[in-house]
Amino acid sequence: MVKIGKSEVSTTSLGLGTNAVGGYNLFAGLNDEDGIKIVKQALDSGITMLDTAFAYGMGHSEELIGQAIQGYDRSKFVIATKAAQDVKNGEVTINNSPEFLKQSVDEALERLQTDYIDIFYIHFPDDNTPKDEAVAALNEMKQVGKIKAIGVSNFSLDQIKEANKDGLVDVVEDQYSLIHREAEQELFPYLRENNISFVPFFPLASGLLTGKYSKEVSFPANDMRNENPDFKGQRFESIINKVSQISKIAEKHEVSTAQLVLAWYMKNPDITVVIPGAKKAEQVASNAKAMNVSLDNDEYKTIDEIFK
Ligand SMILES: NC(=O)c1ccc[n+]([C@@H]2O[C@H](COP(=O)([O-])OP(=O)(O)OC[C@H]3O[C@@H](n4cnc5c(N)ncnc54)[C@H](OP(=O)(O)O)[C@@H]3O)[C@@H](O)[C@H]2O)c1
């Protein structure tokens, strides 16, 4: 089990990303039944962190999770959610004001049908609110027991420093994967020094690191991967080539490439919880087995170097 920042929250180092649970605005072809199965499969497979956000289906992901967790012991898993998208008359703006964040916590609690949220992230920074004031509002929510840990996501390093002026930030969620490693330069050293946990998003590079693609793919309209340069041209070819090299190590362990990649993150000391997403319960069951894969130091380094 790993601990989240300075908080009392602890979880397995493998979680579930749920942007495809009710995230109709992000992917085509989703349905509620699969979404609920995905969440239950995670909890049944020993995964103890569910990562969601208001923005996934504008509240619908949280609602489906609220339904799925009924009947499970709430003390045995943690829920992380996020807010910042303020919807008025169909227009979405980013809002980090203390009033908006506190109202967002209360609304998320209702959708999730729970008494507390383990991690509450500010999903995106706005332009106006001083970041320490935004975090202070979440600290008020923490003091009254509505949330247990404070996170920020998609903040620049300067914004993270401002948010953490009073040492109240427990966790940062940002893009990081074997093919997007910018966070190693400045972010990881700062987080290490300040006892802040790190949760990478897009750990499987939206499926690219599972080894299932061998030639260029296209996705249905309304799938956010259509705009992703990782899936295009020379960059795509170079990634596929590297993935095929690490697939050989996966074969040696008799595991899938996705399981190998997830095990690599779990061995990485700068990563606290890895939260692969899924479209099907079977993917969750398979990814959960990565918790049983252990890489030796040479394998860890080889994978590291292939993608450096
Ligand atoms: N804070 C933020 O701003 C932010 C932004 C993005 C994401 N997130 C969080 O991070 C989580 C992870 O990101 P993500 O889900 O977009 O990307 P990801 O974890 O890199 O990739 C997940 C996708 O890979 C495919 N996949 C997963 N397991 C597989 C398996 N075993 N075999 C084959 N394919 C498999 C599935 O898509 P297909 O079946 O369609 O291939 C799945 O939806 C999200 O769910 C969300 O909770 C946060």
Image (cartoon, rainbow, N blue to C red):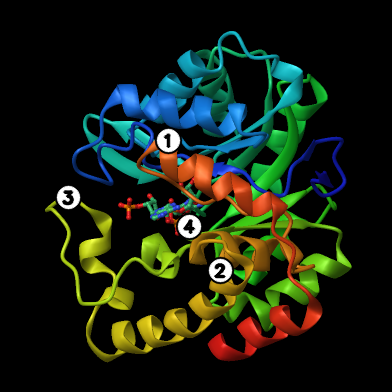
Mark 3 — residue?
Answer: 222
Rendered view: 15 above or below 114: below
Query: Does the residue at mark 2 contact the one at mark 3 (Cβ under 8 Å)?
Result: no
* Crowding near the residue tagged with mark 1, few <14, some 14–19, many ≥20 C-alpha atoms within 10 Å: some
Q: Quadrant of the C terminus?
A: bottom right
Nearer the observer: mark 4 or 1; the answer is 1
Residue 197 visible, this orientation: yes
In front: label 2 or label 4:
2
Residue drawn at x 75%, y 38% is 149
Vertically, is 122 above or below 200?
Answer: above
**Separation of residues labelled 4 and 3 (CA atoms):** 28 Å
C-alpha gap between disc 2 and disc 4: 24 Å
Q: CA distance from mark 3 to mark 1?
A: 22 Å
- Residue at the top extreme of this rendering: 71
Q: Is residue 24 left or right of residue 193?
A: left
Instruction: Tell me the distance, in whole angstroms, between the alpha carbons under discs 4 and 1.
Output: 39 Å
How many tags in the picture?
4
| Residue 147: percent from left, percent from top | 71, 27
Please give the label number shown on residue 281: 1
Question: Which amino acid does the dot numbered 3 rest on?
Answer: Asn
Query: Which of the two labelled residues, at mark 4 and mark 1, occupies the earlier sequence position?
Result: 4
* Among numbered discs 2 and 4, the one appearing first in the sequence: 4
The circle drawn on residue 127 is 4
Which is nearer the N-term, disc 1 or disc 2? 2
Up-down: is 210 above or below 4?
below
Q: Give yes or no for contact between labels 2 and 4 (Cβ–Cβ under 8 Å).
A: no
Observer-side mark, 4 or 3, equals 3
* Mark 2 residue type: Tyr
For residue 176, the mark is 2
